[in-house]
Amino acid sequence: MLLIRCPHCGNRPEIEFHCGGEAHIARPETPSEMTDQHWAEFLYYRTNPKGMHAERWQHRHGCGRWFNALRDTVTDKFAATYEMGSPRPDLAATPAPARTA
Amino acid sequence: MSQPFRRSSGGHIDRTQPITVSFNGKTLHGYRGDTIASMLIASGSHLAGRSFKYHRPRGILSHGSDEPNALLSVDWRPEKGEGRRDPNNRASVVEARSGLKTATQNHWPSLETDIGAVNDLLSPVFVAGFYYKTFMWPRKFWDKVYEPFIRKAAGLGDAPEVPDADRYANRHAHADILVVGAGPAGLSAALAASEDGSKRVILADEGFKLGGALLNDVTSEIDGKPAAVWVEEMVAQLDARENVIVLPRTTVFGYYNHNHIAMVERVADHRDNAPDGLARERLWQVRASKVIIAAGSHERPLVFENNDRPGIMLAESARAFINRYAVLPGKSLVVATCGASAYRTALDAKAAGMDVKIVDIRLGEDCGPELAEARSAGIDVLTGHTVVKALGTKRVTGVVVAPLGNDGSVGTRRTLTCDCVAMSGGWTPSVHLFSQSRGKLAFDASLDAFLPGQSAQEEVSAGACHGIYDLSEIIADGYKAGGSDTSVSATATFTGFQPVRVLPTDADPKKVKAFIDFQNDVTAKDIKLAVREGFESIEHVKRYTTTGMATDQGKTSNMNALGLVAGLLDRPLPAIGTTTFRPPYTPVTFGALVGPSREDRFEPVRTTAIDPWAVANGAEFEPVGQWRRAHYFPKAGEDMHAAVARECKAVRTSVGIFDASTLGKIEVVGPDAAEFMNRIYTNAWAKLKVGGCRYGLMLGENGFVMDDGVVARLAEDRFHVTTTTGGAPRVFQHMEDYLQTEWPDLDVFITSITEQWAAIAVQGPNARKVVEPFVSDIDMSEGAFPHMAVREGFICGVPTRLFRVSFTGETGFEVNVPVDYAEAVWKTLYEEGRKYDITPYGTETMHVLRCEMGFIIVGQETDGTATPDDVGLSGLVSKKKPDFVGMRSLARPDMLLPDRKQLVGILAKDPNEVLEEGAQVVEDPSLPVPVPMIGHVTSSYFSSNCGRSIAMAMIKGGRARIDQTVWVTTPKGFTEATISTSVFHTVQGEKVDA
Amino acid sequence: MRRFSLASLLKESTKGHTGWERQWRAPEPKKEYDVVIVGGGGHGLATAYYLATVHGVTNVAIIEKGWIGGGNTGRNTTIIRSNYLFDESAALYNHAMNLWEGLSQELNYNIMFSQRGVLMLAHNHHDVVTFKRHVYSNKLNGVDNEWLSPEECKAFCPPLTISKDIRYPVMGGALQRKGGTARHDAVAWGYARGADARGVDIIQNCEVTGLQRNPDGSVKAVETTRGTIGARKVGVVAAGHTGVVMGRFGLRMPVESVPLQALVSEPVKPCFPCVVMSNAVHAYISQSDKGELVIGAGTDQYNSYSQQGGIHVTNHTLDAICELFPQFTRMRMLRSWGGIVDVTPDRSPILSKTPIKNLFVNCGWGTGGFKATPGSGHVFAHMLATGEPHEINAPYSLDRFRTGRLIDEAAAAAVSH
């Protein structure tokens, strides 16, 4: 079971959270102007990386807030969690975070 | 004397507490501190089971949880009746206690005489993977003949057949440091880690007595004290520390993500008088900041012909039986080894009075100080010798040994007579938990072992599982892992071995059964066959031969198998691949994993405030999601059909009362509430007046109907939204998601109020008369309070949100009151309603009444693939809004096709025939399979109000098929029906629409 | 290829089985192949087999980054059934079912296809209606499936509890008698041996790292850890790693890879005669020929390539199993493991052309791919050989995500696969 740092509440076990899939896919401003293919890509196509993944989590059974996280999908380790609306942290620009136990 | 092989003194057993255990109907005698294995050995027997495939007689290989052979069925409390027996318990770790009823497995008619042993004679045919090559003809014989035969032959013990009489507990804990294993390394680590009192330390050990290998040790001294004394002092110190939890009988079996550790504590089975209700086992889930793995190591068997005969055991296990349990594994012992540690067994056996010889595959010059010590103790040591085979069947009677020439040739055989053999093929560090933590293993050629390499989580290994075998170094390693540089002086340990995969032999290897995996009967021959057939990855070899896949998960066999494959392919051992270890370390009961989540606590039942009244008034219930809802209220002698017919009539002719509390309720509040509603729902909300209600339809972003419900506008900035019962959490989270992540600019709060407001539906021509007398602060006149309106005021003096809505087509009110008052309000309305013969009704009647009106239920008419137009609700989809959730998807090509399934009515030709919900609809039933289907029945009832059966269906291009004759499947074939519109009933009087 | 038979087995038993040959070779990759299949799982191996046997295309390589059958083929709970609701699904899975029925004989490899019956339990009114819809649809599509009362369920599966007192009492079940299990490893090995014998090169421990394309954009070669391998056509059949491989080819896919866990108990004597699935309580169970109870459940919630999930998922699965079979709480979990399953938005697979000419993809089988192995390989081989979809896999194109013509069994039925 993952240990997830909610930006508002701190470390909590995974069962308090809901995963909302890939982050930073903003809903288009004007969907009706999009082609079917572009709409399909917004709805269904995902990066699904093997490695660092930006994803959405909600502290559903806690504060209820959505936030974003960077997690390595090979090790399942979180590199960062950050508030919704913040840009994806540049990991290369910051020192590696301490290992989360 | 009942314990002829019991030593007169010594051992960690309590001779003041004699015990007896039933074993295959016979009585074994022993003492507290024994295991079943040690009691059996005390009786002079080793025979403890039959092997999986060849049914060969097997003894006791080990003294620990890696035991592959001695597996017993144990009834833990036969005196208490059924439900406490389980199979496959290792005799070597079952803590003996008077009253246990144990039996060996996998034989017929008896352990001593097993017909299945004929398989041993057929073993030239039953090689690895033989079943892939045969049993294919005739084709039908696999299911009917071969497979049942194989299944019956396979398996070990018998599964429990009656429900478990025990219960299980679950506990979560946090620890700064979790120490796995209470041997010399683990005790030192725990002591160091807890030293300053600031850290919470948990020390867990799978054994029932702490000390690990030191319990077997009667010769070592640590800082001048006997090892056993040192252990006692360490344990006493730890026990005295308030920041330390010491857990014996607790197996750490799983190392999961982010240092989430699973362990199982055996709580009750060892207790003589366990109180009723005491949990049998407890699952611990520990989140540890750091884990110190001090799990020790496993000894490897030697691989030679008939190395599985009873009486042949691991050398360290022989030492454990002699010293810890004070039983002699026989009178005459041959120690066969390729390393130093087994010499300690030989010396201790000799000291215990056994006749001892050592056969060492190593040359004398390759041996360490152990050789001289053994010889000076008067032990005959044959160095540079191989063991060709063991003699005897149900008990070893001797070993055939031969000298090895410099060229590896096998010299003249000679026989050493004995009644037990202690073998040592070297040591394998227990890296299971480290591997589970996804750390990378690194091969150390000098130790011939995989050791913990790069860590993936916050853990450190210490002691033997870290590749350290000398006692003083082990203890120093433990202290170091615990954060201290303490060192001790301890007796030097005999260490080092020369790995050997299969002992050299001059016998025809094709005819030799030398076992690698004892339980699964995998021989060196089988491994060779697999490699010959092209299975080169160790995972392929495992799967083809089943080596390492028995209940011991290859703890003793993995390295021998790996080494043999590497040798056959002439590749370095790590190139063959390593096994990835996965939980559990040793098998864990389902009960422990389930814990208390059984029966009532499997998934909690949600009930409404009215539920006690429904129970008292004889309701039949049905599960709806997690809720329990009243299904119908039968009167004496009524079946469901009669009750529902009566309830339906009552609502249309007078008045009914219905508990609608399970409907989801969400309050949407804020200056941007209307805008938010506009984006979430298909309808437009800006023009809905305060006090007005509107039926709202909600789509997923994929354009399919997600939920529906009546929405009331309580104020300019406040909406009271209702959802389906099952959809409430989903809708709430859907709203939260969009609000927080897509439209954070909207100034809106949403709050689930399902649990705060109960809803009582009063429906029927007399509904107003029932409700009105109790209402205050609300103008109840028709003009002031029309259909589809909401008013806030009081009922029975209690605050209410009073909805004028109808899901039945009749005049209706939904009385929302705070749940604490709901039952009282319900009773008041019910009492008043008696004047009009008010009828409580359940979900079935609600379904029939709404179907009569053609109202859909999301989840019944829709199934996650229906658009608003499919269910005839395109009128609710705003054409003016620039966007709402799901709008774009509705414009995709497939959503616009004319042959999509559409909601229609469907009427059976026979008005008394109720079509089956789920039945398929076809145009021409005479066509051959596959018969084209045009749709399916979604709802179907007998309507007492319509005087006939009615149904709804989703039919391809259905709205263009009104009046078309179709055929509907029945259990017996097809029945004729006609497509119709989906409104079946016309309400007299007040006209309402939903 | 040396034929397997009782006679050959007996003959070998007299000489210590020294005469058996390799079941497949370990060849060096050639410079170029007509078809390169990326992924040596059951689906990829079956594709190669049918390319050779049905279409006569034998200049084929299977490139596998680990060992064949080591992904989801060797990690699933081996359930085989075809009682799907929609015409498109019924056609695909029943195609597979028909191939399963003669597969041991066709491959001359006993894959132990055991038609012991798959029973899907209904626990509420919605389940009942949904399963009846399945039963009727299946009957009309010629797919074996029937409705059983709770008592009939109990008779078919005696260990089952049909007490009314449990949290979700059994209200009936849908039984596919033709359904059952097969020995998963043997399926991979049998196809591998059959394909190899017909000239297909199985190249293990070789990872595909990139794609080379011709000036017209079409496929030219795959780059691998063992060099560049020319390819006229490439079929990617990489299951959980499809997204990774296609990413290396510059394409995004509508798939996500999530952990799926399963477990087995210690082996016991036969105590469970069939396969039971229960959607409402999220669990499925059968007993292997070796005697282990084989138990599976739903996926973890997040994307991961770690082949590891949380213990809470295991716990919840066993909660459900022990609710239905309370006698099993004293059984013990012997082994648990995780796979990486590639899940599409409609939980149906993708067997499709791609935006790159001569690059084809077969993925998205989610939690239910094993049962389709022969059918998937058979129709995908058709596609690789002819360049056009077989009529059975035509609906499974990538284009359906654009048009909205999804094949969403789960949404329609709320049934786990």
Image: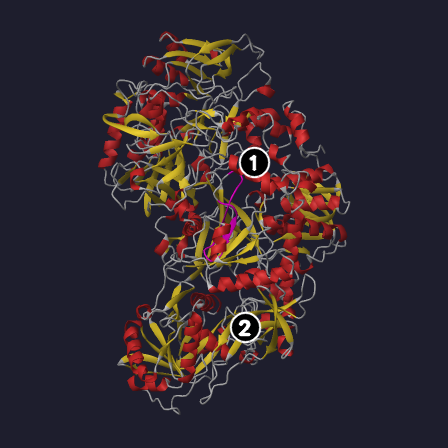
- Viewer-proximal residue, B464 or B640? B640
Secondary structure of residue under mark 2: loop
- Please tell me if label 1 and label 2 are on a single chain: yes
Secondary structure of residue under mark 1: helix
Left or right of B270, for residue C33:
right
* The label number, if any, that marks residue B913 in the structure image: 2
Q: Which region is colored magenta?
A: C272-290
- Viewer-proximal residue, C225 or C277? C277
Query: Label 1 amino acid?
Result: Arg
Identify the image quadrant of residue C412: bottom right
Separation of marks 1 and 2 at Cα, in angstroms: 56 Å
Q: Chain of mark 1?
A: B
Q: Residues within 10 Å of mark 2 (few under 14, many from 20)?
A: some
Is residue C275 covered in magenta? yes
- Viewer-proximal residue, B592 or B930? B930
Task: Give the residue at x 51% y 37%.
Answer: B152
Identify the image quadrant of residue A7: bottom left
Q: Residue furthest front?
A: B637
The residue pinned by badge 1 equals B543
Q: Is residue B691 visible?
A: no
Q: Residues within 10 Å of mark 1 (few under 14, many from 20)?
A: some
**First in sequence: mark 1 or mark 2?**
1
Instruction: Name the image colouring.
Output: secondary structure
Residue B616's x, y, as percent? 30, 69
Is residue C408 covered in magenta? no
Query: Label 2 amino acid?
Result: Glu
Residue B674's x, y, as percent? 45, 78
Q: Tell me: residue B903, above or below residue B353.
A: below
Residue C107's x, y, as percent? 68, 40
Residue C172's x, y, as percent? 49, 58
